[in-house]
Image: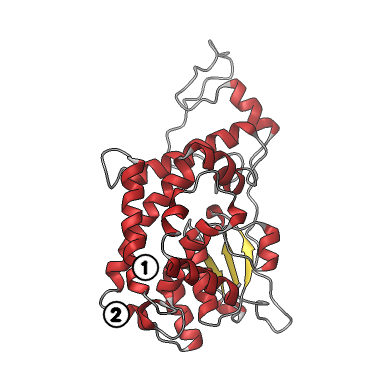
Amino acid sequence: MPSKNGADGPAPAENEPQPESRPPSSPPTQLPKRTLFSVPTPIKQIFDRFPLVTYNADEAPKGHTGQSIRNRLFVFIDPDDARKGAPSFNPQCLKWQSYLKFVGIDFDLVPSNNHASPTGALPFLYPALPADSLDPIPSNKLQKWAIEEVHCEEEQQLNVRFDVYMSLLDQRIRTAWLYQFYLNELNFDKVARKRYIDPSTSNAIVQATLAVQLQQAARDELLKHSNFINVNDLEADADDAFQALSTLLGTAEFFFDRDRPGLFDASVFAYTHLLLDGSMKWKYNGLARLLSKHENLVQHQQRLFEKYF
């Protein structure tokens, strides 16, 4: 990451001790010794060829009225899919993309990454508001902003069972997803790498580094819940979660017997759609096999996709 102080690094502190001066007549007796912070010559040569440059942040585009053109949701997505308004390939991004659609908020999709986010995570939204109040809205404030925009009420979260069933998604299904997407080697090479690594850089060394980081992050997350990773246990837990969700939905169109989809529908759809979507081109998809046993969940995904996408 470029230094805030520019390409040459931070200036020395004003109270930092300076080296003792040598009388002009006294030549140096030896070359400076290499310090802990010295840059090895091969590394320095690389940075000399590719210097770091700090650019000013781009301003959000505005119309002639002093307003941003439209609401813009920044998500993980292929640029062509963004232009078509297609679903994001990231579950967290797709959750909020879907929720905003469900409550009737119009927006444009902008391909992005975590480094571009004010909070270090996607999604975030730039609202179509006057320029002097144009602040990005992180995902943890998107629902509040949406409710204020369209004056809707999130009835699903008033249900006492909401948090219990949401934990099934956040824990059992999400952990199984993390393994299938990042740690299954067939999927990582053909599905995850194609979406998260290849678009970021063409440098093979950087690609290899990003691959290690992504897989280690997924592994660390899974080890928060267990001392070791057992794929059979992960899939068994996901199977139980799908069964519970299927029972909760029953014969209703939307969860908690609501007459229109809400946040919980968006949260479920974010996983079910990506597991059932042929464009993901899974090489191994054990979770889709478990999900497909529940016809009402499959129909729920199809119904939402056909109506809102």
The residue furthest bottom is: 151
Q: Position of residue 230 (x, y in %)?
A: 32, 40
The residue furthest right is: 64
From the viewer's perspective, is residue 73 above or below residue 149?
above
- Asked which secondary structure carries label 1, the reply is helix
Protein image colouring = secondary structure
Tell me the residue that label 2 is attached to.
159
The answer to which of marks 2 and 1 sits earlier in the sequence is: 2
Question: Which residue is pictured at 46% across the width and 71% down the height?
Answer: 266
Label 2 Cα crowd, 10 Å radius (few <14 / some 14-19 / many 20+): few
Mark 2–mark 1 Cα distance, whole angstroms, equals: 17 Å
Q: Are marks 2 and 1 in contact (CB under 8 Å)?
A: no
Question: Which residue is pictured at 61% across the width and 78% down the height?
Answer: 131
- Asked which secondary structure carries label 2, the reply is loop
Can I make out residue 38 in this image?
yes
Left or right of 123? Residue 175 is left
- Which quadrant would the C terminus be assigned to in this image? bottom right
- Which quadrant would the N terminus be assigned to in this image? top right
Tell me the residue that label 1 is attached to.
246
Q: Position of residue 27 (x, y in %)?
A: 58, 13
User: What's under tag 1, amino acid-wise?
Assistant: Ser
Q: Quadrant of residue 243?
A: bottom left
From the viewer's perspective, is residue 304 above or below residue 43?
below
User: What's under tag 2, amino acid-wise?
Assistant: Asn
Label 1 Cα crowd, 10 Å radius (few <14 / some 14-19 / many 20+): many
Residue 162 image label: none
Along the line of sight, the residue nearer the viewer: 57 or 149 = 149
Q: Position of residue 180 (x, y in %)?
A: 45, 46
Left or right of 170? Residue 146 is right
